[in-house]
Image (tube, rainbow, N blue to C red):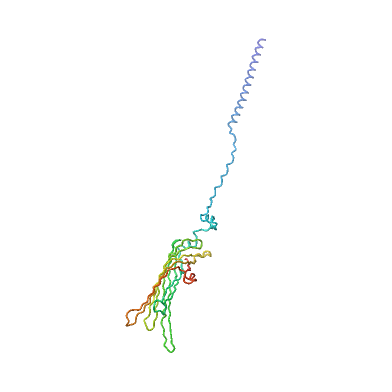
Amino acid sequence: MTVKLGSLAVCTAIVTVAGIASAQVEAGASTGASAQAGGQAEAQPAEVTLAPAPEPAPAAQPVALEPAQTQAQVGMGLPQQDPAEDPAETDHEMMVGRVGVGYLGLRGLVMPTETATSASTTAEVLAPVVGVRYWMNPLLGLDLGLGLTAQFGSQKDTPAGGTEQSDDSDLPTVLIAHAGVPLSLGSKGHFSFQIVPELNVGYGWRTIKNPGAEDIEASDFHLDFGARAGAEVQFGFIGVPELSLQGGIGLLFATDQTSVSQAAAPPAQGDSTSKRSRTSIGTDAGSNPWNIFISNIAALYYF
């Protein structure tokens, strides 16, 4: 009986120990699983949602600054210049390096009349000057021209009951050389403001028939120089910038030396001569009001 009780006690102790061990194992397993689950949860990174990057701001557009001239015009209340208009493309500047051919004005010499026997009786003989203009740059140009008037003719007279008489007409010949240095001080669109220093040198001669005596030789030397201020207007507004009109008035110094001589008939000794000089200075606009249109207006065509 005692043995049985001891065996029972031993069995009971073994079962108790086994239960405790089993409980400890289950508790450890549960703890390990929890720890493993916790470790996995800690190892897995948290999901992060990134906000979309803001779009870059549009690049600043360059600001078109108005030219100083336009700003000044706005400040003064004047009309603004068209921004599309290229100031370098004026009609005048388009003609740089090109040759203009045309009429450069009217000049005249004082020549003794066909009945003159002295230099005091004279008449003006006009010679239109035709030449060229060449612009070396927008500021500086060159004018060269030549004026010529040559007259020829004959005269026949038949008196009643007499013999026919004929001779060549004693008409004058006039030659004028022109040179100028046009200066364009400013241009805009179809307009160019110019000052033109100029020089003209002329010479004229004629032979006056003198029946029954020696012929009379007459001549005149002319010199003038000065400057004109005016404008050259080109017809770019109708699509022909090559065509231009120029005109102006100015200050002119002019001098003429007129001479008349006649060979003396034998037995007289020496020739008979008469000389006259005339000098003037003043504004150059012509002696008649309409001379501003025929003397100071010139036309050119550029090639």
Q: Is residue 229 left or right of residue 36?
A: left
Q: Position of residue 43 (x, y in %)?
A: 58, 31
Q: Position of residue 83 (x, y in %)?
A: 53, 56
Q: Position of residue 44 (x, y in %)?
A: 59, 32
Q: Position of residue 201 (x, y in %)?
A: 40, 70
Looking at this rendering, what residue extends furthest in the top direction? 2
How many badges with numbers are in the image?
0
User: In the picture shown, does residue 167 fall above or below 82?
Assistant: below
Report the quarter where the N terminus lies.
top right
Looking at this rendering, what residue extends furthest in the bottom direction? 161
Answer with the quarter of the image where residue 128 lies: bottom left
Q: Is residue 234 left or right of residue 122?
A: right
Q: Nearer the viewer, residue 17 or 104?
A: 104
Q: Nearer the viewer, residue 48 or 89?
A: 89
Q: Nearer the viewer, residue 257 or 41?
A: 257
Q: Nearer the viewer, residue 99 or 216?
A: 216
Answer with the quarter of the image where residue 167 lies: bottom left
